[in-house]
Structures are given as structure tokens and as C-alpha cells.
Amino acid sequence: MKFISPLVAVILLSVALTSTTIAKQENLNSANSVEYLTSDETTSLNLPFSEAVRVGNILYLSGAIGNIPGKKKLVSGGIKGETKQVMENISRILQRNGSSLDRVVKCTVMLADIKEWSAMNQVYVTYFPEKRLPARSALGTSGLALGARVEIGCIATIDD
């Protein structure tokens, strides 16, 4: 076995510690980086928010309503039609940003009339098969954008 001089040992240890520190710092910076995400569908509407914000491997979606993509017009069909469109809008935003409905961990549902919760829920649960339902809060409001019946915001995971 060869003997390593103390100076060489100190240099090797210093290089190893520096490399480890840099790697940890890069991971920390990556985990704390914030990206404000949007698409042509959202920017064409000239609204004051990002459709999603990514922090590390978490994607925070702004509340989505049942509008026709790229337009400030709601779909027809009342609460059920709007809920279906909301979930389709959410699915597109997730896919555009490297996630999907099966990666959603939390939803916040806002209803123009809390009495429509059951009808909204009948549609909502069909988008989460195998009983992999995200945590959820639901509340009634005094009004939603464009006169919508429902708005849903989500939090989802995403690959690094």
C-alpha cells in the first residue's frame, strides 16, 4: 500500500468537500427555483396571472373555469358542462407542464352555489380513476369570473 502525503490527503479531502457542497447547493437552488408558466391560451386572454407556477417539483395551477380554451366564453351545460370543461382545461395545463391528473395531490373547488356541489362532484370524480382522489376543499362563493358556476385550482407533482 502506498503512503499518501498529508498535503495530498488534505487537497483530496478539500476537493471532495467542495464538490459535495456545490452539488448540494445546485440541488437547493433547483428545489427553490420558481418558474411562472403560461401558454398562448392564457396570454391571448390578457389576464393578470400565470396559468401555473412551478416551485421545485411542485406545480401550482391557478383556478380554472369552464371557458372554451383561448376564449372568455363559458361552455354550455350548466354546472356539469362547466365542470367537465374545467377538468379538461386543468388536464391540458398539467400535460403542457409535464404533469397529469394522476399527479394531482390537492384541489380547491369554488362554487357559485354550494347547492351544486353534488352535481359538480358527479363529474369531478370521473377524472380520478381507481379512487386516487386528491385532497380537496370546496366552498361556496358570491360569484366567479365570467359568471362561472365552478372554479378549480390544483397542486400537482412533476418530475425534476
Image: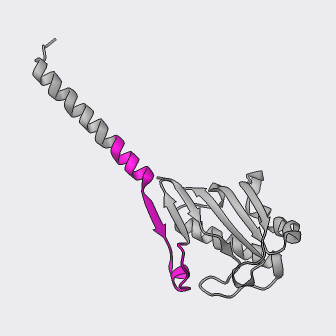
Quadrant of the rendered image containing residue 14: top left
Taking depth in this image into account, of 80 and 108 the one nearest to the observer is: 108
Quadrant of the rendered image containing residue 119: bottom right
Q: How is the image coloured?
A: one colour
Residue 28: percent from left, percent from top: 40, 46
Above or below: residue 139 compared with residue 33: below
Taking depth in this image into account, of 135 and 85 the one nearest to the observer is: 135
Please state if 95 lies on the left or on the right of 68 as rendered. left
Q: Quadrant of the N terminus?
A: top left
Q: Magenta residues?
A: 24-50
Residue 2: percent from left, percent from top: 13, 14
| Residue ID at (53%, 72%) | 50
Above or below: residue 75 compared with residue 84: below
Residue farthest to the front?
Answer: 142
Residue 132 painted magenta: no
| Residue ID at (70%, 84%) | 146
Residue 116: percent from left, percent from top: 86, 71
Residue farthest to the top?
Answer: 1
Residue 67: percent from left, percent from top: 68, 82
Residue 30 painted magenta: yes
Above or below: residue 27 compared with residue 125: above
| Residue ID at (65%, 74%) | 89
| Residue ID at (64%, 87%) | 72
Taking depth in this image into account, of 160 and 147 the one nearest to the observer is: 147
